Image (tube, rainbow, N blue to C red):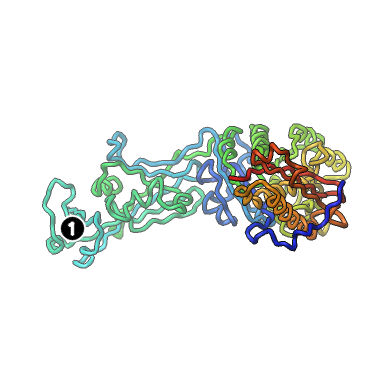
Amino acid sequence: MPEYSVPGSYAKELVSRDQVIRPVDVGAALFVGPTRRGRRNKALQITQYTDFERWYGSAADLDFGPAAPRAVNVNYIAHAVRAFFAEGGRQLYVARVTGAGARKARFRLTARGTDKSLSLSCVARFRGDLGNAEARFTEVRRVADAAALAGAATGSLAVSADGLAWFVKEKKRWQRVPRGNSVLLKTRELLEFRPSLVTMDASFVDADGERFEYPGLAFDRRHPDWVGRVLAEKPAGREARLTQPFALRTGTRLDAGGAHAAIFAGIAADPSGRLVRRVQLSGGIDGAPPAGTAYAKPLRAVPADVSLIAAPGSSVFGDGEAIADALLACAAVPGAFRLAVLDLAPALGPVDARAASARWQSARAVTYYPWVRAAGTPELNLPPSGFLCGLYARSDAEYGVWKAPANLSLRSAGGLARAVDGAALEMLNPAGVNCLREFAGRGCVVWGARTLTADPEWRYVATRRYMDQLQVSITQGLRWVVFEPNDEPLWEAVRQQLEAFLIAQWRAGALHGGKLSQAFFVRCGDDTMSAHDIEQSRLLVEVGVALLRPAEFSVLRLVLAVGA
């Protein structure tokens, strides 16, 4: 092996400030699975547990039908998200999936058989049991003077003091409702009816008891606060699209008078004189536990910065093996640089755990045993994937990606579902099943950091993740070469840039070796490229790094397009 030392070209400062390679973050995770509510099949980034609650609902159990045991109904994604952040995770995406038969709750406000264009229905925007809400609509009348009438927006609804005459605002004038009378009244003429402006307050209480309030809604579609706009099935703003759980589905020809009548016709006033209508949305169900096919769509659109993928709790579902296979296929996509964190079934003993993990042979898969007891709820066992994804991010921040994420305690675990003794450890560790162990004074400790492969080059999680980080960091840091001619000045600049980056990694402790030649090498030039490569504008780079022992190199080979 030739000896590589610090090139003298460092003093030439060939590398500009915007061409410095920086390590990328490989701690971003994606969790896929069922939740209480929320948008389906699309990964959304959350930075704290309250984001999850706002977009996906609480950690209350799901309801997969009367035949499903509690262990299947547990809201594992919610618990995994909480564990991820408690263990030190920072970047997380969640993608909701649903199973067969999941439906939205609804209530028809207009009579069955009403022309669809004149109909009005109250619907849950998201599928699931959580949408079975109680809705309350309250008519609000405010006596209006000339200033209030003049300042009212187009589409405002007004009613006479005796409740017999209704009017809707047309720009600066008021028209009788229904519109058979074409006479437009001026404000001073409307005042003779001693009118009140009419709006509606709507509130919903979902199946978990969470309340949502929408005051001051209007009945005419031209009004800025029209109920069909504020409570639209497809709201305009991103936050509303993610958080608004209910909508009013309005027919295309439904006018202000028709909307008011659909909600309040035939309703007797309460003791305070108000019209209040209460309805119960029904028919919302979570359906069956998701099948493997349900996970396919979000796993085909994984955000580019995600490095860890998991489906916490999916191993309790009937299609758990197919879901694990979908995760493995997603992690194996060339150039994706992902690691699948798989969960074993909760009730497995060591022998069965070893057998179950044998079908997952992959350098891009990792699993942990056993399940973890929830803190404060000892009867609740949780899959370890959520805890470990968060711990990876914590280990990266505190020690570096090259450090094995092992011999670290789980901060938020209440214990383990079963004890792991020495015999179980000797059985599982060689098979790549990483054990969790419980020690007095330390709690639950991660006692292994292996991938599920027999290939010794990729046996360790730290090797897999650090090499992924190197390749992504280098590829991103060398994007500038695409505009350069494939000649000696470019090769020298690339070598300089890579060597500067790797020296920094060596000094940080990522690479082994008492001197640079033992820690890494960089090749870019006549020894990596043929004349044909150069003519075809292919820049070939070889980088070797000593991750385990000095001068024993793991090698990256990069092919970059240049001369664009």
Q: Residue at x 79, y 51 (%)?
A: 404
Q: Measured along the vertical axis of the image, is residue 131 above or below residue 113?
A: below
Tell me if residue 169 can be seen: yes
Residue 279, given in percent of the width and then of the height, sits at 38, 46
Q: Quadrant of residue 311?
A: top right
Q: Measured along the vertical axis of the image, is residue 325 above or below residue 485?
A: above
Residue 72, given in percent of the width and then of the height, sits at 63, 39
Q: Residue at x 45, y 40 (%)?
A: 104
Instruction: Locate the C terminus by quadrant.
Output: top right
Q: Secondary structure at mark 1?
A: loop
Tell me if residue 391 can be seen: no
Name the side, left or right, on which 40 lies relative to 563.
left
Q: Residue at x 54, y 49 (%)?
A: 56
* Numbered label tally: 1
- Amino acid type, callout 1: Ser
Residue 302, given in percent of the width and then of the height, sits at 59, 43
- Number of residues whose C-alpha sits closer than 10 Å to that of mark 1, classed few (under 14), some (14–19) or many (20 or more): some
Residue holding disc 1? 160
Q: Residue at x 37, y 53 (%)?
A: 202
Name the side, left or right, on which 558 lies relative to 128.
right
Q: Measured along the vertical axis of the image, is residue 54 above or below residue 126?
A: below
Residue 27, given in percent of the width and then of the height, sits at 67, 52
Name the side, left or right, on which 299 lies relative to 521.
left
